[in-house]
Image: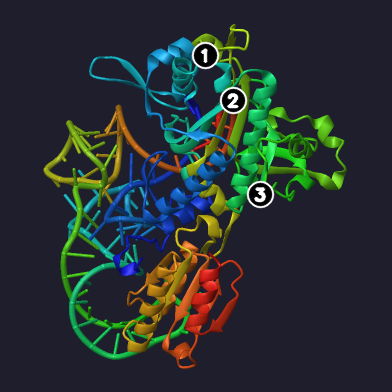
Amino acid sequence: MRVSRFYMPLLRETPAEAQIVSHRYMLRAGLVRQASAGIYSWLPLGHRVLKKIEQIVREEQNRAGAIELLMPTLQSADLWRESGRYDDYGKEMLRIKDRHERDLLYGPTNEELITDIFRSTVRSYKDLPLNLYHIQWKFRDEIRPRFGVMRGREFLMKDAYSFDIDATAARRSYNRMFIAYLRTFARMGLKSVPMKADTGPIGGDLSHEFIILADTGESQVYCHRDLIDMPVPENVDYEGDLDPIIRQRTSLYAATDEKHDAAAFDAIPADKRLSARGIEVGHIFNFGTKYSKPLGAKVAGPGGEDIAVEMGSYGIGVSRLVGAIIEASHDEHGIIWPEAVAPFHVGLISLKTDDAKTRQVCDDLYAKLVNAGVETLYDDTDERAGAKFSAFDLIGLPWQVIVGPRGLAQGQVEIKNRRTGERQNLTADAAINMLTHKH
RNA sequence: CGGGGCGUAGCGCAGUCUGGUAGCGCAUCUGGUUUGGGACCAGAGGGUCGCGUGUUCAAAUCACGCCGCCCCGACCA
């Protein structure tokens, strides 16, 4: 993409409403624009990041055996009356009437709807286990939206729902998601820690929140230090025995504020105790038959008897992750995108667009990078060099290729690593070779 | 929802107390000089001063009402 043809409104100054670093950079780098309190438009750069995150989530869900579908944002109130949550959910649920005065709501979550789909289509225990998910916009009319997309009212969430014949099988489904979540966040360059958590209005007795440590996080959390850098499981056989991995993660203390047990925490050696702030990026629940019983989601068991299915639900805050990643990865100049979620991989900076040689080398580099499948943002505008450097540091692409007459006189271009600041001079061909082999 | 604050050009702000021609910086546009870390000079465009009602010869400024947004707390991906 050429900057001259792209839409990327950058802000030189920080809008007054942005308090935390991720919100400030999201506005300055032109990732989002606030439409009203807690509701955002996603501008092209932000949209590209959102889609990358979404795709990583999708791949890891699929790998763990979950199956994607898509449910609507608007739901009928009737189903929610059936589960009893129409009254329980309170003012956080946005209620709407259509022209026939029928009660609708903008879905804050989808347990009812998915259970309705399940009960009307699945009849036999032989169809289990089943895990269905979608990635869809949700609306929760938060009392106080804040921190940009970190606590929006409208937000993009991946929510999965598992159906199993008994508690043992349900626990296995839970474990699959547990591990898929570890892998998902690690792929985005995040260190996530699963922590014992409260179940809130979703219900159930078993629940973990996946927390990213950050000073600006909204949750107070407590855990054993060794959990932070614990390696993420690779090459997982999701059909095999997952217990050892789960045990490794859950035997060390880790809990959110609501589930905090001071005595257990104090039993950890002092130098391993970690009390910190964290951002909740995922939350998994096992809630047994809380929805399947009232909604009549049952299947025929081996003996022909009706069995209410055991359920769980598993959420990831996709739009929140954009903010969380920035909180975890930035410096005083701007965002530093992890490669996997960067809106472009390479920023190609032409320092002198009216110099024929510079232009020719840049155009050639751009064509070759694009042909090689490297996502490249090519600054072909006649801005001054300093302005371009600042802009590219702000938007945080992992690599910058800097091309100007001075380097070309030596037959060289410069490559800068945004994260480390490390620079190297090499020929254009070597630069292409290097950047191509990174992806 | 309780407490605090803000709404004036795309962004950041001054002006409001004490009513009297709507300003500054950045950004934008034009011309020129510049050009390897956010250039300089000259000129230009851009405003129902959040909305409404009232007071007044006169309202960004005073009064009342409403709306929107932000921050701190209790709730959540």
Measuring from the top left, give residue A100's x and y in whole percent.
Answer: 24, 15
- Distance between the Cα atoms at labels 3 and 1? 37 Å
Mark 3 or 1, closer to the camera = 1
Pick whichever of labels 3 and 1 is earlier in the sequence.
Answer: 3
Q: In the rendered image, which residue does mark 3 sit on? A: A191
Q: In the rendered image, which residue does mark 1 sit on? A: A297
Which quarter of the figure has residue A353?
A: bottom left
Q: Chain of mark 2?
A: A
Residue furthest out toward the bottom? A409
Q: Nearer the viewer, residue A309 or B3?
A: A309
**Crowd class of label 3 (few under 14; some 14 to 19; many from 20; radius 10 Å):** many
CB atoms of marks 3 and 2 within 8 Å: no
Q: In the rendered image, which residue does mark 2 sit on? A: A129
The local secondary structure at tag 2 comes to loop
Q: What residue do we see at 47% from left, 31% from top? A: A142
- Distance between the Cα atoms at labels 3 and 2? 30 Å
Pick whichever of labels 1 and 2 is earlier in the sequence.
Answer: 2
- Type of residue at label 2? Pro
- Distance between the Cα atoms at labels 1 and 2? 14 Å
Residue furthest out toward the top? A305
Q: Nearer the viewer, residue A434 or B21?
A: A434
